[in-house]
Image (spheres, coloured by chain):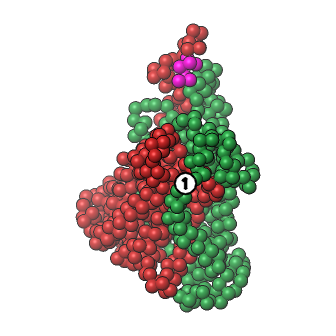
Chain colours: A red, B green
Amino acid sequence: MSTTTATRHRAPTTDIPRPGSHRQHEVLRLLPNPLLIFVLLFLGAMVLIPLLYIFLASLNSDIGVANGEFWPSTVTFENYSKIWTSVGLATGLTNSVLVAGATAVVSAAMSVSTAFVLVRYTFRGRLTILRGLLALQSVPGTLMVLPVFVLFSSAATYLGIQVIGTQWGLFVTYLTFAMPFSTWVMVTYLRGLPKELEEAARIDGASNLGVLFRIILPLSWPGIVVSGIFAFLLGWNDVLFASVMTRPESQTAAVALQIFGASQEGGAIPYYGQMMAAALVCAAPVVILYLIFQRYLVGGLTAGGVK
Amino acid sequence: MSTDASHEVRPAADTAAGRAPRNDDAGQQPGHKGGLRRKGLSERNRPLWMLIPGGALMIIIIVVPLLLGIYMSALNLDQYTLRKWISSPFIGVENFVEAVTDSPLLHAVWLSVSYSLLAMVVTLPLGIAAAVATQNAFKGRALIRSVFLIPYVLPSFVVATVWRTMLQPGGIVDEALATVGIHVGLWLNGPQTFWTLVLVQIWASWPFIYLLALSGLQSVDHEVHEASALDGALWWNKLRYVIFPYLKGPLALAFLIGMLHHINNFTLPFVLFGVPAPADVEVLPILTYVTSFQSFRFGLSAAMAFISLVLIAIPLFVYLRAVKLDDAETPGAKK
């Protein structure tokens, strides 16, 4: 909009290129071509070579990986059939999907309603809550893991509620730690929504809940998906809480892989091929989610700047 | 967005920016500026009960354990007394004294801060270069942007597992370096581990800087590009004097958040090196974890955790001051 006016003003005196033309790209260019190509190639190689390596090594024999082969001398898909029992990925992935999935759904639902109140109403303590949401994102997990563990084991001793070693303990923990960021994502999203629809609905006599369910929910699903995905990732990626609070049967995939990797020390040749296959399987859902929802996720990442 | 919304938000944003913590809460000024229509809506019939589920979780799982942690840091707590932790001996500040004088804590603080800074010093130029290179449109740019962000979206435990395999003695990295005649020695043991940690952290986190630098570049008006093209500015001068000033805000934010991430990063060193970690990568999160769950000195560990919270509080405080709480814009991007 402003571009066109500027062009109109200057057009008689100079030959400013039209938007979209080839020379327009030249105006935006910040680096000379050779340097640009160098930067892209360097960074592209830095990212892609390790990624390619994971895939190739997952097809390789353990001895091939140990000898530092990039291209496998023997290609086998055996690793992919072994990891389900050897690494325990069958249980691990089931638990991860259950816990992280439940975290995502509940956290998304709770953060919409919380953010709705924070954005659309004014009340005492509102800014304190907003500030708290940001501060809580940075509370280190290592600070919390011991007291939460003690709290949960006290719940077992004094109240008879057994949460340690179950998926419930993980779920509640992840849900709590996902809430600040998920809510923050929703707060930034709801602020961008026009108010007119809500006001119209209120004039028609809609209640607070009516506005939330009939107006906000249908309009904000991209934000809901993003805040759900971030909650999912928090559960999927966590090693710290899962390593302290799970038993073998409630282990998540992250812990299963970490334990498998650590147990390979000091024996014969470690099962490198299986480790890489398992790493790839654990990474795949995350990367696929990212590629599908990339446009929305990137906005969310910059909004709060938390992984 | 509607001008109406921004109009109503403004008064609250002003109090947040002005340093008057007393006027913190928008509710205290029944918005005579903000719009009369809104008053009826916001003063009565506010569904504040919707805050209860989230608030209850925060209090039970974050606030209570935080207080519990502070109390535990004053107890002589080990695996024998943990079960009945309430009745374990109270020893006051002894844990703090031991943490500072007779534990690797100070070394860990030094490692954490220096590793975070070093990683940041390298990721900043990488991220900026990537953002500058993908700023103008060319074929395949969308693909390149997606690829650049992959290291950042990969789970830390995957990144660590993969690099742990690649950096094994005689592994792919050693082989590749040997072909050009470089022999580095052990990556995962001994004094070089510190640099290994820095390197892997750089690989995993530069896309975050890229992301924020890119959003900074997109805020540069097209006219600015045209003006500097008219002036015939050399690319270097254009970057230095025209473009970089636009990046200051987003990059300052990226610096703070990045530092917080690095200092808090437990998974990467934990999975990359295992526990007990080599002494040169025993960063704060690892030390706190090992003291709890390997040495079972729970009280001491709680004291360490408390000290690291104080350390975190410094960048966090700066970050919270810089963020505009009541604005739809990217927090920290100052106007």
Residue at 50 percent of width and 46 percent of height: A189
Around disc 1, counting alpha carbons within 10 Å, would you say few (fewer than 14), some (14 to 19), or many (20 or more)? few
Query: Which SS does the magenta portion mostly show?
Result: helix
Q: Quadrant of residue B302?
A: bottom right
Q: Which residue is mark 1?
A: B45
Which one is in front, B163 or A301?
A301
Which one is in front, A9 or B258?
A9
Q: Amino acid at mark 1?
A: Asn
Percent of width and height locating residue A37: 47, 35
Percent of width and height locating residue B124: 59, 47
Residue B197, compared with residue A303, is above or below; it is below
Horizontal side, residue B313 vs residue B174: left or right: right
Question: Which residues, given as a range, are shown in magenta?
Answer: A1-7
Residue at 40 percent of width and 32 percent of height: B139
Residue at 46 percent of width and 51 percent of height: A207
Which one is in front, A212 or A190?
A212
Percent of width and height locating residue B216: 58, 39
The chain ID associated with circle 1 is: B
Residue B203, compared with residue A299, is above or below; it is below
Q: Is residue B316 magenta?
A: no
